[in-house]
Image (spheres, rainbow, N blue to C red):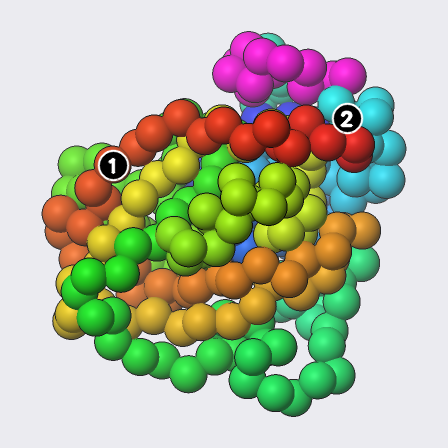
Amino acid sequence: MVFRLSPSNIEQLKRMPESGMGYQIVKIVKITYISETIIVLNGTLAIDMNGLKFKHVLNDIIGKNLEKAILSSTERNVTILGIVSEAKAIGSFVSEDDSVSKKRAIDGKSENANGDELFVRLSAFENDFRIDKVNHCLLPGSFTTTASDALRCKIENANPKERYALPNNLEIQWAFNIQPKSKDTLQRGVVQSDFGKEGGGREVYFENGTSNRTFIMQSKWQNENSSATQ
């Protein structure tokens, strides 16, 4: 149900786009040479799609100590075929509303950042593998939300796992603040309902990542509603 990907798999996924903030929907080849779709969290922790149906069992397996759960899980080196498109993802919701305001960020119009606006990645992982801490930037193909939308989670006591339709119920622990430069491009959109989660939050997709020295701060995330009913 849950396993840890090999270092070479992790490096491969770093070069591939996300499916949403903090996760990738990936097609792999099993030992039996049959393809399988899995969810990968932070490029490291893999969960088979059937495992998502048993959220409470999954929570018991992972427990409270995320790093310990990763280290204690079995490591597997798999053959990665690619990222599954959102339209083909199991359990995915595709909106029939064609208005720009309702589209996913990946379908949004590309625009230049204004150089002042802040964006935030919320994560259960202290070491978010989409954050390049050497060059202080966001890797290509990564999602964030806007700082103002993340703030709404605190002001309105909204559950970020629901608002950003995350495929897991791990507690959000960290916020990574990004301030792209005016030469960086981004696409805006709205998180669609998926994985039994409501969605509706703002999402921003950085196809080409961000320039060096645009990752400005990492801080602890505290939200009273983060442990709301799963």
The quadrant where residue 83 appears: bottom right
Give the magenta range. 60-71
Which residue has dot 2 on it? 58
Q: Amino acid at mark 2?
A: Leu
**Residue 16 visible at all:** no
Residue 183, percent across and down? 15, 71
- In the image, residue 119 sits, relative to residue 192, either above or below, namely above
- The rendered magenta stretch, by its main secondary structure, is classed as helix
Q: Quadrant of the N terminus?
A: top right
Residue 174 occupies which quadrant of the picture?
Answer: top left
Front one among 156 and 2:
156
Q: Secondary structure under badge 2?
A: helix
Q: Residue at (80%, 58%) from the top-left corner?
A: 91
- As for residue 61 lying within the magenta part, the answer is yes
Query: Image point 72% across, 77% down: which residue?
Result: 95
Instruction: Give left or right: position of 217 versus 20.
Output: left
